[in-house]
Amino acid sequence: MGRQARLILDPRTKFLLVLCMGLSVTVLVPMYVECINMLLFACLFFFNGQKKTAAKLTGFFLVLAALSSIIPQGTGIFSTVVLPVVFMTRRFMLPIVSGKYLIDSTPVGLLMSALEKLRMPQSLVITLSVMFRFFPTLGEEYHNIKNAMKMRGIGLNTLNIILHPLVTLEYVMVPLLSSASRIGDELTAAGHTKGGDAPGKKIRYKTARFSIADFVVSLYIATGFCVVIGSQLYM
């Protein structure tokens, strides 16, 4: 990871964030709680060195929140079609954002250290470590394919995908699927080469440990849980 992170959370805290954001989809969360959650993730991305990502996600969420407040409830097409789509997008955005932060900000060595402290089976530790390396590497392959298409004068955009679906399938999906298969094999072989499945206790270069930031985030999660449950009881 080439970014310089100024705040490093323990992977166990990040897993707790992902779990809580996923559970928030099943209950009716007040709008102000969603806004505070989005502000939290914007700060986390900012301190992880991803300023543009923080700005884009915050802007997109604010647009969704504004549309949810502006569009009146009724029988028109906006209230029956647009409003439900905006609502569902907004509700599922935070779990996706939390998963993105988990993958973007967690080094594989730190992840393996945290999972081993949770007494996870070694097979699960290796599987998750390969998965965390897989998606960023696949993203790099996608950008390489996109740049190669630009050099050939083929722009990868929504209009070309609609007008030329077969060309998109040939120049994007076929090499991407081929790269996905190759990347999976290479990462698995790399894990075995580094002794990931070797028996015995391992010494990690990076060790997962809780810090004051983890305590603050955990306290925020507990407080938010109490607020949501309280709002449900007194509705």
Image (cartoon, rainbow, N blue to C red):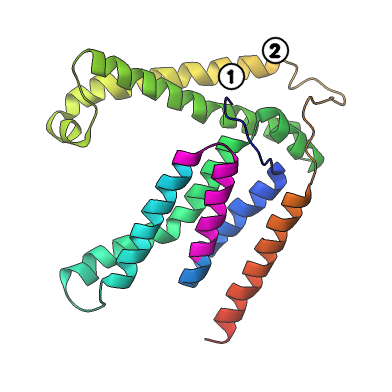
Q: Quadrant of the N terminus?
A: top right
Please tell me whether residue 86 is drawn above or below residue 30 in the rendered image: above
Front residue of 36/182: it is 36
Q: Residue at x 22, y 65 (%)?
A: 81
The kind of residue on which mark 1 rests is Leu
Asked whether residue 172 is in view, the answer is yes
Q: Earlier in the sequence, mark 1 or mark 2?
A: 1
Q: Is residue 8 left or right of residue 32?
A: right
The kind of residue on which mark 2 rests is Thr
Please tell me whether residue 22 is drawn above or below residue 177 in the rendered image: below
- Expressed as whole percent of the image width and height from the top left, the position of residue 12 reads 71, 46
SS class, disc 1: helix
Q: Is residue 36 left or right of residue 107?
A: left
Dot label at residue 187: 1
Please tell me whether residue 221 belongs to the stretch shown in magenta: no
- Expressed as whole percent of the image width and height from the top left, the position of residue 176 reads 37, 22
Place residue 223 in its image quadrant.
bottom right
Front residue of 206/59: it is 59
- Expressed as whole percent of the image width and height from the top left, the position of residue 174 reads 31, 20
Q: Is residue 1 left or right of residue 203?
A: left
CB-based contact (under 8 Å), mark 1 and mark 2: no
Q: Is residue 150 left or right of residue 140?
A: left
Please provide the residue range marked out in magenta: 34-52
Q: Residue at x 57, y 25 (%)?
A: 2
Asked whether residue 174 is in view, the answer is no
- How dense is the environment of label 1, judged by Cα within 10 Å: few (below 14), some, or many (20 and up)? some
Q: Residue at x 56, y 15 (%)?
A: 186
SS class, disc 2: helix
Numbered-mark total: 2
Residue under label 2: 193
